[in-house]
Structures are given as C-alpha cells and as structure tokens.
Image (cartoon, rainbow, N blue to C red):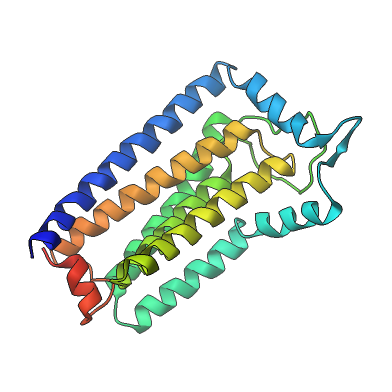
Amino acid sequence: MRARLRLNETVPLLSLGLIGLFGWGFVTLAGEVLDGETFGFDRAILLALRMPGDLSNPIGPSWMEESARDITGLGGHVILTLITVSALAYLVMTGRRHAAMLVLVAIGGGMILSALLKLGFDRPRPDLVPHGARVYTASFPSGHAMLSAATYLTLGALLARVHAERAVKLFFLGVAVALTILIGASRVYLGVHWPSDVLAGWCGGAAWAGFCQYVALLLQRKGKVEPPAIGSAAGAAVTTP
C-alpha cells in the first residue's frame, strides 16, 4: 500500500516536471527562432543530410528516402485521425466514455494548438534543399512532430496504465517515443522542416500530452474519469488513491 501511495504521489509531480521542462524548451526555441539564432544550426544539419554536389539527393540508399516518406505518413492528419477514431471507438465500446472524451480533447486540442502556433509564427519552409514531400502550411512548429508526440504519447500512456507489468509499460511508452522521434526525424531528412521546427514540435507536443495526462490523473482520483482497466487488478494498482 505504501508503494502505491508513493507512486500516486510521484507520478503527478513527475508529470508537472515534464510539462515545465518541455514547455521551457518550446519557449526557448521559439525565442531563438524569432531572433534568427537557429539558422546556422538548421542550415548545417539540412546540408549534412544531402549528398555533396547534389542537394536534391538525400544521403543514403534510395530505399531510405522511400522509407522516410512511409514513416512521415504516420504523423499525417489522416493516419492520426484514423488511429484516434479507433482508440475512441474502443474506449466507448468498453464503457469508458469519459476517458474517450479526455483522449478526444487531448488529441483534438493538440491539432488546434498546432494550427494556431503555425499561424502565429508563420515561418517559411526551408528553401536550401528540394522538398521530398508536399507541404501546405507554415514551418514552425512541425505539425507532424507535435501531433505525433501529442497522439502517440497520449495513447502510449493510456495503454501503459492498463498493465501492471513494468516491462509492458516500458514497451508501450518506448514504442510511442520511438514513433514520435522517427516521424520528426523524417521531416528533416526529407527537407520539409528546419531541425528547430521539429525540436519545438516535440517539446510542444510532449508538454501538451503531459498536461493532459496530469489532468487525467486528477480526474481519475475524483472519480470523474474511468480507470484505464475497469475491474482489473492492474487498473486498481495504478489508480487507487
């Protein structure tokens, strides 16, 4: 019981710490971008990922560029919407309507926040190298990086809380983090984002996901949101106040 109490005290504090850390990272990057201090860093990385003498050709074999396009699609609005709708349908069918609403607010809110930030900063896309994918919006922050962080980290945390086994928890969280990193990295590799766009997207998405998880913990303690695993020992072990 003491271990459970310590866990219930530590997790919210850890969530707040991560929110502050990633929020600070986003604000710092945004300030440096506005002042033009990231251009040298951005330029060096973009050029390092291109073949010398042929900036239209990314480094590595041809299959790597095609793989990057496949990976970057996992952070697109269509794929993220399909994943979100599937998760919502699962939660509703298993009687967790309040949890479904929280997931909808977390992911939908992340999409709205990303769009507003892009409109506010209105940073042009990189023009140093040809783009390896079509783009339609402003550059900062990276929508793919931010939305993949908000979506996959939110769902990864939800799945992790369903299971009591630490190895399973780490697996779900590890997959969520790996997907987020790969999607963001693919945007830089394809030349459609400055590296600072992606870093800011990761920070913004992680801060937003952390905030939503913190709210979920508070609401679960008050009984306003269903525990991740209703009636299971795993859910009770994690959510018992």
Residue 200 location (% of width, % of height): 51, 36
Q: Image quadrant of residue 42? A: top right
Q: Residue furthest front?
A: 167
Q: Residue at x 37, y 83 (%)?
A: 93
Does 119 sit left or right of 41 as displayed?
Answer: left
Does 84 sit left or right of 133 as displayed?
Answer: left
Does 91 sit left or right of 55 as displayed?
Answer: left
Q: Which quarter shows the C terminus?
A: bottom left
Q: Is residue 239 visible?
A: yes
Q: Is residue 171 above or below residue 141?
A: below
Residue 228 location (% of width, % of height): 28, 71
In front here: 181 or 76? 181
Q: Residue at x 29, y 81 (%)?
A: 95
Q: Is residue 61 above or below residue 171?
A: above
Does 134 sit left or right of 146 as displayed?
Answer: right
Q: Which quarter shows the N terminus?
A: bottom left
Q: Is residue 224 visible?
A: no
Residue 71 location (% of width, % of height): 67, 57
Residue 55 location (% of width, % of height): 86, 34
Q: Residue at x 81, y 46 (%)?
A: 60
Q: Residue at x 43, y 31 (%)?
A: 25
